[in-house]
Image (cartoon, grey):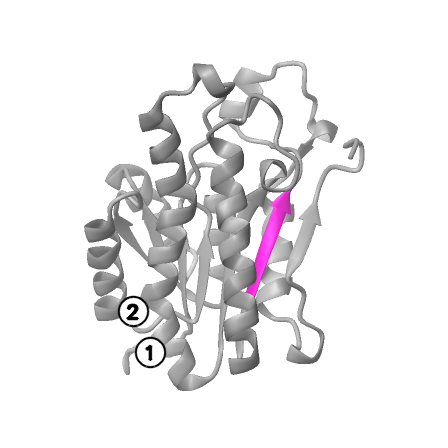
Amino acid sequence: MAASNRRPVCAVVGVGPGLGAALARRFAEQYAVALVARGEDKLTALAKEIESTGGKAIPVCADVAKAADITTAFDKIRRELGEVDALLYNAAMRPFGKLMDTKPSTFENTWRVNAFGAFLAAQEVVPAMLKRGSGTIIFTGATAGVKPYATSAAFGPAKFAMRGLAQVMARDLQPQGIHVAYVNVDGAIDMPFIRERFPQLGADDMLKPSAIAETYWHLAHQDRSAWSHEVDVRPFKEKW
């Protein structure tokens, strides 16, 4: 952690108007937060909002599908905030399509955003976590990482890859003090895009971003005698 910054550092990778923003706001209550995503304007606006309430946040523009962007992003985070204490990997690309509807480029890009980016981001933060013997890494999963539907020809394999990465990392890193968790978000998250695409869904049919963020907060602060790895969150009405 930078000497001038007394707060622990949280990197939220994949900051949109839904869960990413909710995670940033929740963790900014006690952490200095790096907001990582494409789209400088939206990141700057959220950073200003957090700063206006006494928090610390910096916008970090990056395309997580590109290795060079990940490297540059974490170089900036370390330089301006310090080493990362909590990595929340929330970046996602969610195309709909069956096998023959899915372009090879869509399959590859979906894997890059969901799994490859998670791999690269983890490699950026783990060395410092190992050195101090502590840290938290949480991946945002989805139903498709457990039970993909026929229309998840690209998304399902990508989330399976992320889930596998989380398990590999947990078995490797948890005995060394780094908590690795995978959150299966089993249902639609309440945000403008989802309301537009699925107008039939009511408030009780969707997960509130702020409520999911509370689960991440709990995971990041569990006593190491009782760590969770895979956690499901779903609306009370969801069939599963």
List the residue tagged with mark 1: 1
Could you tell me which secondary element the residue under label 2 belongs to? Answer: loop
Mark 2 burial class by Cα count in 10 Å: few <14, some 14-19, many 20+: many
Q: Position of residue 65 (x, y in %)?
A: 30, 43
> The N terminus appears in which quarter of the rendering?
bottom left
The disc labelled 1 sits on which kind of residue?
Answer: Met
Could you tell me which secondary element the residue under label 1 belongs to? Answer: loop
Mark 2 or mark 1: name the one nearer the start of the chain.
1
> Does residue 80 appear in the picture of this structure?
yes
> Does residue 49 appear in the picture of this structure?
no
Instruction: Give the residue at x 66% y 77%.
Output: 223
Determine whether 93 is above or below 231 in the image.
above
**Spatial separation of the CA atoms under disc 2 and disc 1:** 7 Å
The residue segment tinted magenta is: 180-185
Q: Which image quarter: residue 51?
A: bottom left
Mark 1 burial class by Cα count in 10 Å: few <14, some 14-19, many 20+: some
**Does 8 appear in magenta?**
no
Q: Position of residue 115 (x, y in %)?
A: 42, 47
> Residues at badges 2 and 1 in contact (C-beta under 8 Å)?
yes
Instruction: Give the residue at x 28% y 51%.
Output: 59
The disc labelled 2 sits on which kind of residue?
Answer: Leu
Instruction: Give the residue at x 45% y 36%.
Output: 17
Determine whether 214 is above or below 180 in the image.
above
List the residue tagged with mark 2: 81
Q: Position of residue 50 (x, y in %)?
A: 40, 53
Determine whether 91 is above or below 204 in the image.
below
> The C terminus appears in which quarter of the rendering?
top right
Query: Foreground: 9 or 233?
Result: 233
The chief SS type of the magenta part is strand
Q: Which image quarter: residue 146?
A: top right
Residue 181's disc is none
